[in-house]
């Protein structure tokens, strides 16, 4: 399939997952408001200068109108949403404000015990503040001629709500919140943001959550990496957040392998998001980047810093990183030849700690965007540490598009993933299949 048709097919598939609501560009109403690609970011998303002392503490809340909702006898379906800003701790140990949303479901919880809570970690949304998942709940399709963002994660959120599960969604560090860039696929930032979203939801007044509410984590792609990292970090960082189950779909556990796979793909722009985030978190890497990036590379990083996934697909689809470097080397080759970069990415690797609670790792066997092999290795690593792992290879054919090979398992496996997690939230024990790993693709 020619490149433009592949991109069009990918965009069409994402759009059909949701209803669409257009968002027009709005003029700034105050000097301190941020405008990203013609979209004025609501003042809610600008953090205060002083933050609370406790991780997960609420900074501010406001009602969040859902873009897709239906009237019902018991209230609007699927529920009532609240926009959140809460405190977390970043990978450098500093305080950071993170935004997100909590949705109180209209549907009754019919599983065992109190109504449970699931923290949803979104898949790749982009790096512009207008791409935040909480904004995607309000505007499922953001389209103003300068930016394109599809809130595809709404599908998983609504499926969970329909089961009577309360949901909290994190926007991650720097996505939505206007004080810094989104630290894309930063293991610690993402894991902390997920765990602190749970704390923030439990601190919110007027919900049906109780001290007995079981907690689950749900994420695919970037979100799968975030939930996997959270499950590893939970025992030390958030011992108060006991995990009944974690779903990690297509997790980017080894960023060295993911970097090589994404280079030249439809989602090549994600390389720029990674670089932008890592250079913000680790300024000592800046001289290395400056030595290797040419003018086109620096321009791409600046442009990508305000782009959503749809923008990056259209502007940088199939771009090779060799176009961004002074010597024509790929980013993968530069990483392999630079000990500081290799060590930094090694520290980002997920799989070096035993996760808390039962985990379900799913990966498409034909996924060559977030490579199947490195996701499978995460399951193996966790099994070797004695974790309770359910490994699910999603058997779909290679359709000739890395993006569609990656997106297909998201839809094909989502129902099973929700069912597995709701079983854990009902108190049913998981059946680890670590014993079968030598036989699994």
Image (cartoon, rainbow, N blue to C red):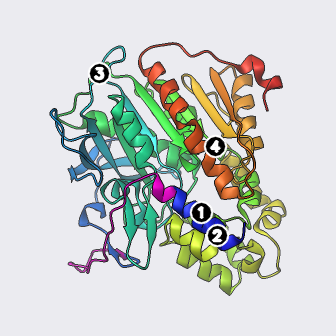
Residue situated furthest bottom in the rendering: 295
Where residue 9 is drawn, which disc sits there? Answer: 1
Q: Which residue is mark 2?
A: 5
Between residue 199 and residue 315, name the one nearer to us.
315
Q: Are marks 1 and 2 in contact (CB under 8 Å)?
A: yes
Q: Which residue is mark 4?
A: 250
Which tag, 3 or 4, sits closer to the chain's start? 3
Tell me residue 66's x, y (percent): 27, 51
Mark 3 vs mark 4, foreground winner is 4
In the picture, residue 148 is in which quadrant?
bottom left
Which tag, 4 or 2, sits closer to the chain's start? 2
- Identify which residue is drawn at 33% across, 22% down: 213
Mark 1 vs mark 4, foreground winner is 1
The boundaries of the magenta stretch are: 14-35
Between residue 437 and residue 300, name the one nearer to us.
437
Mark 3 vs mark 2, foreground winner is 2
Q: Is residue 225 above or below residue 14?
A: above
Secondary element under disc 1, as helix, strand or loop, is helix
Mark 1 vs mark 3, foreground winner is 1
Between residue 163 and residue 256, name the one nearer to us.
163
Image quarter of the C terminus? top right
Tell me residue 234's x, y (percent): 50, 32
Secondary element under disc 3, as helix, strand or loop, is loop
């Amino acid at each position: 399939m020619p490149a433009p048709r592949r991109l069009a097919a990918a965009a069409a598939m994402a759009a059909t997952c949701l209803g669409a609501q257009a968002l027009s560009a709005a003029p700034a109403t105050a000097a301190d408001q941020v405008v990203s690609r013609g979209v004025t970011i609501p003042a809610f998303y600008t953090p205060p200068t002083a933050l609370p002392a406790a991780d997960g503490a609420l900074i501010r809340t406001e009602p969040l109108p859902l873009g897709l909702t239906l009237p019902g006898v018991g209230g609007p379906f699927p529920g009532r949403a609240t926009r959140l800003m809460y405190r977390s701790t970043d990978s450098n140990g500093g305080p950071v404000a993170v935004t997100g949303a909590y949705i109180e479901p209209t549907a009754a919880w019919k599983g065992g015990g109190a109504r449970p809570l699931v923290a949803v970690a979104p898949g790749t949304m982009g790096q512009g503040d207008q791409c935040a998942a909480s904004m995607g709940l309000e505007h499922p399709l953001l389209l103003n001629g300068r930016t394109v963002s599809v809130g595809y994660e709404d599908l998983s959120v609504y499926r969970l709500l329909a089961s009577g599960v309360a949901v909290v969604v994190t926007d991650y560090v720097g996505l939505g919140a206007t004080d810094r860039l989104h630290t894309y696929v930063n293991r610690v930032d993402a894991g902390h943001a997920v765990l602190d979203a749970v704390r923030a939801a439990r601190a919110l007044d007027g919900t049906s959550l109780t001290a007995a509410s079981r907690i689950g984590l749900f994420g695919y792609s970037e979100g799968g990496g975030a939930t996997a990292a959270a499950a590893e970090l939970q025992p030390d960082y958030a011992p108060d957040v006991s995990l009944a189950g974690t779903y990690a779909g297509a997790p980017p556990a080894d960023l060295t392998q993911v970097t090589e796979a994404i280079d030249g793909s439809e989602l090549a722009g994600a390389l720029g998001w990674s670089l932008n985030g890592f250079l913000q978190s680790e300024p000592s890497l800046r001289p290395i980047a400056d030595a290797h990036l040419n003018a086109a590379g620096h321009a791409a990083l600046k442009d990508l810093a305000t782009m959503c996934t749809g923008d990056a697909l259209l502007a940088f689809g199939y771009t090779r990183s060799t176009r961004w470097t002074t010597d024509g080397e790929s980013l993968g080759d530069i990483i392999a030849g630079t000990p500081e970069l290799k060590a930094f990415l090694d520290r980002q690797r997920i799989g070096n700690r035993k996760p808390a609670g039962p985990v379900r790792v799913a990966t498409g066997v034909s996924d060559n965007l977030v490579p199947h092999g490195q996701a499978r290795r995460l399951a193996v690593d966790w099994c070797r540490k004695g974790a309770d792992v359910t490994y699910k290879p999603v058997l779909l054919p290679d359709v000739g598009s890395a993006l569609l090979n990656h997106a297909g398992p998201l839809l094909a496996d989502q129902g099973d993933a929700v069912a597995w997690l709701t079983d854990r939230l009902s108190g049913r024990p998981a059946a680890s299949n670590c014993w079968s790993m030598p036989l699994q693709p």
